[in-house]
Image: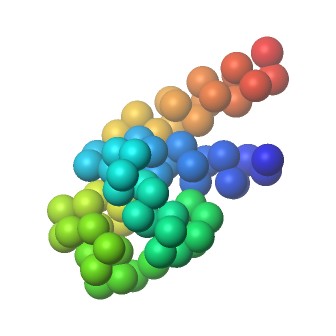
């Protein structure tokens, strides 16, 4: 798995309000996590709600630290 793909998975799953069911709906609607993160606000809102669509547009708090920790774990 490429780093961009891993980062997209991590970003999706760290987004506030995105749990297993919401992630499943988003992935069913749009495919891979990268595709989910490229969707318009209105497309995301149609599958989730406005709050989650807003959250998906922003980088989750702690994302950079989490990607660093994941990279360290994978290479360590």
* Coloration mode: rainbow
Locate residue 71 relative to residue 68 in the image: left or right: right
- Place of residue 16 in the rendered image (x, y in percent of width and height, measured from the top left): 28, 46
At horizontal 35% and vertical 45% (from top left) the residue drawn is 19
Against 42, residue 25 (above or below) is above
Name the foreground residue: 30 vs 68.
Answer: 30
Residue 37, given in percent of the width and then of the height, sits at: 49, 67
**Quadrant location, the C terminus:** top right
> Could you say which is closer to the camera, residue 28 or residue 57?
28
**Residue at (27, 68) in percent of width and height:** 48
Q: Quadrant of residue 53?
A: bottom left
Q: Is residue 39 left or right of residue 74?
A: left
* Total numbered badges shown on the rendered structure: 0
Residue 41 visible in the displayed image = no
From the viewer's perspective, tell me whether residue 68 is left or right of residue 53: right
Q: Position of residue 43 (x, y in %)?
A: 36, 82
Residue 55 visible, this angle: yes
Residue at the spot 42% in from the left edge and 55% down from the top edge:
23
Query: Please, is residue 43 above or below residue 51 in the view?
Result: below
- x and y percentages locating residue 67 in the rendered image: 58, 35
Q: Is residue 50 above or below residue 46?
A: above
Nearer to us in this view, 9 or 25: 25
Say if 2 sits above or below 28 in the image. above
């Amino acid at each position: 798995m490429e780093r961009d793909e891993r980062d997209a998975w991590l970003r999706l799953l760290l987004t506030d309000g995105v749990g297993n069911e919401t992630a499943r709906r988003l992935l069913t609607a749009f495919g891979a996590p990268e595709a989910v993160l490229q969707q318009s606000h209105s497309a995301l809102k149609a599958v989730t709600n406005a709050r989650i669509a807003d959250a998906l547009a922003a980088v989750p708090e702690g994302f950079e630290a989490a990607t660093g920790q994941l990279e360290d774990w994978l290479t360590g």
